Image: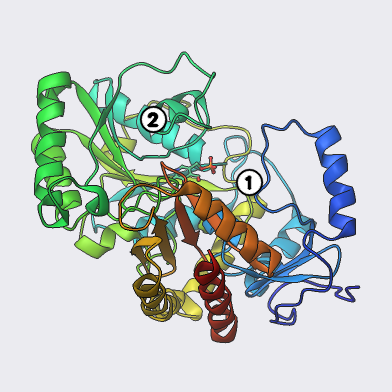
Amino acid sequence: MSTVTQGGPSLPQERRVVTEIPGPKSREMFARKQAAVPPGIGTTLPVFVTHAGGGVVVDADGNSLIDFGSGIAVTNVGNAAPRVVERVRRQVADFTHTCFMITPYESYVQVAEKLNEITPGDHEKRTFLLNSGAEAVENAVKVARHATGRQAVVVFDHGYHGRTLLTMSLTAKNMPYKQGFGPFAPEVYRVPLAYPFRWPSGPENCAEEAAAQAIDQINKQVGAENVAAVLIEPIAGEGGFIEPAKGFLPRIAEFCRANGIVFIADEVQTGFARTGDLFACEDEGVVPDIIVTAKGIAGGLPLAAVTGRAEILDKVHVGGLGGTYGGNPLACEAALGVLETIEADDLVGRARRIGEVMLPRLRAIADKSPIVGDVRGRGAMIAIELVVPGTREPHPTAAGEIARRCHAEGLLVLTAGTYGNVLRFLPPLVMPDHLLEEGLAILEKVVSEI
Ligand SMILES: Cc1ncc(COP(=O)(O)O)c(C=O)c1O
């Protein structure tokens, strides 16, 4: 039984499995969940959490799991990170809401100033705040349409942008995100993504051929002059941590520049030090016109942002943007605590170090296990793609089975991918090395048993 009274980094940084997983208390709560919550809200691992911090998640039965998920790339600074907790604690006692559009407060402006400063490009920028990644993507598209007077939006194979009507329409994968939820929003056009592992003529031709195909399709099927925005994740997240072949992103950005198209980078999953840069676009020096952020921005409090060129964002009339809760003062304080933590604790460097530990270990696993077709990613955004041995045929059942066995051992991993055959690893950037090593050892053992 757990004696833990507080979460955050002071939690014992250890894997501890004291019951079967899920244990009896979690099973009891899960039965209540099934009676009270619709099944459409799925569950990756039905353990009910009581505390979390550093690199672990502690459940109601007293199990302490190694966290390779960060609540889907959210708790980059760790759960209940001290600077976040302290700022939110102070704010919640001062005031909880005024609506920034009614009577503003400084922390919103500070977050905007900071994002204008740290996002790629030294042009003049503006930032406004929303509640979720999907809401921010929708707003980026609204702004791009308004600024260009055009309607079409171009997105990519394997892209994921959210679950609202527009963002579901922008998302590539049907099941489970779109199935039965149509009709979808119009003026959305999908073009190929440079997916090196699955490019028919080989990874060496991928960037050039994919960019040529994408641009040709835009020109032929849409007309560049009708395109308001091209929207892309610099590393496709839900699609399976697909890092586009080098050269693809700069080529697409250049095409946008030449044709007056707003280039929007969806950095909802890749942002805030996750990939070993503050933002993934930096890897190839790509400067988006608009960058959309969420997830890692506020350590788990709901916040998202649209940051972009002043001349684009300033076009929208007064009152054309906003929402009741966007930039809530608690979430803004949390974001300031996150940004301080990333800087003070060099979490960009820490993400790189995680990649340096994980990638060679995973490549060694792949060398021994023909079921692992590809190892990829940057920083602390790493994945393995599972295939039927000797082929490139996706192997989703293997991914599911490995995830299940890791969970049973007390290692929380997530799956992803258009074909459901990717295991993705997103440890909090503050995870200590010994937990990272222990998690990798569990993974190695489980993969060797499949
Ligand atoms: C790249 C990307 N865009 C948008 C979203 C949607 O964000 P939210 O779930 O906060 O609406 C996600 C969520 O996973 C994402 O990964």
Find the distance from the CA under tag 1 to the CA under tag 2: 27 Å
Residue at 38% in and 65% down: 275
Mark nearer the N terminus (1 vs 2): 2
Q: Secondary structure at mark 2?
A: helix
Residue 412 appears left or right of 273: right
Q: How many marks?
A: 2
Residue 125 appears left or right of 183: left
For residue 170, the mark is 2
Whether residue 82 can be seen here = yes
Residue 272 appears left or right of 285: right
The image shows residue 68 at horizontal and vertical percentages of: 57, 66
Quadrant in the picture for residue 368: bottom left
**Outermost residue to the front:** 390
Colour convention? rainbow
Q: Mark 2: few, some, or many residues within 10 Å (few <14, many ≥20)?
A: many
Looking at numbered disc 1 in the image, what kind of residue is underneath it? Asn
Pick the quarter of the image with the N terminus: bottom right
Quadrant in the picture for residue 337: bottom right
Q: Nearer the viewer, mark 1 or mark 2?
A: 2
Residue at 26% in and 32% down: 229
Whether residue 107 can be seen here = no
Q: Mark 1: few, some, or many residues within 10 Å (few <14, many ≥20)?
A: many
Q: Are marks 1 and 2 in contact (CB under 8 Å)?
A: no
The image shows residue 284 at horizontal and vertical percentages of: 20, 61
Q: Circle 1 is placed at which residue position?
A: 328
In the foreground, 381 or 141: 381
The image shows residue 433 at horizontal and vertical percentages of: 54, 85
Q: Secondary structure at mark 1?
A: loop
In the foreground, 155 or 67: 67
Residue at 36% in and 58% down: 389
Say if disc 2 is inside 8 Å of ligand 1: no
In the foreground, 91 or 408: 408
